[in-house]
Image (spheres, rainbow, N blue to C red):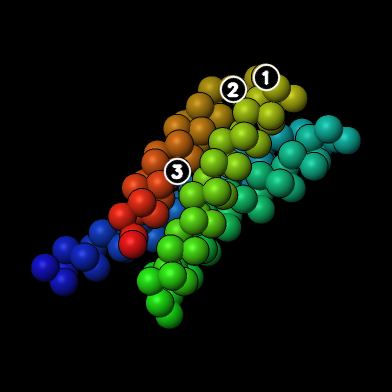
Amino acid sequence: MTNTSNVQKYDLEERTAKFGEDTIKFCKKVPRGPITDPLINQFIKCGTSIGANYCEADDAESKLDFKHKIGICKKESREAKHFIRMIVVAVPELKEDAKVLWQEAKELNLIFNSIYKKVK
């Protein structure tokens, strides 16, 4: 039972880290300018913080601390979806690349919502 738990934790840790990496790679494709620069900055912040906050949740000092950190993951993944959408409005030619990233942000948000609701 412990092995399964560790595998699941590792998978979500790896998945959130990969999302952060993909966020960086995507943002490198976005042309820089007065409209896109703030969007890039915001998306980089929320897209890369999901994994960092998940790592903090994994090392939480209490159930309350864990729930709080998972709540941040939940918010940041939702925010990532928003900024992906805004970037696509600013740079429509990145729509196809954005779809995959947006779907992953959505799935992460659903995962963190589920975890958050289960913690009493």
Q: Are marks 3 and 2 in contact (CB under 8 Å)?
A: no
Q: Verify CB contact (< 8 Å) between mark 2 and mark 1.
A: yes
> Is disc 2 surrounded by few (<14), some (14 to 19) or many (20+) residues within 10 Å?
some
Q: Which residue is mark 3?
A: 109
Q: Nearer the viewer, residue 28 or 35?
A: 35
The secondary element bearing badge 2 is classed as helix
> Where residue 34 sits in the image (x, y, percent)?
88, 35
Image x and y of residue 102, in percent: 51, 33
Task: Please state which amino acid type lies under the numbered disc 2.
Answer: Lys
Closer-to-camera residue (111/19): 111
Amino acid type at mark 1:
Pro
Query: Which numbered disc, 3 or 2, marks the residue that appears first in the sequence?
Result: 2
Q: Residue at x 33, y 62 (%)?
A: 120
Mark 3 Cα within 10 Å, few/some/many (few <14, many 20+)? many
Q: Which residue is mark 1?
A: 92
Residue 95 is labelled as 2
- Residue at the image position 69 percent from the left and 30 percent from the top: 87
On the question of residue 16 being in view, the answer is yes
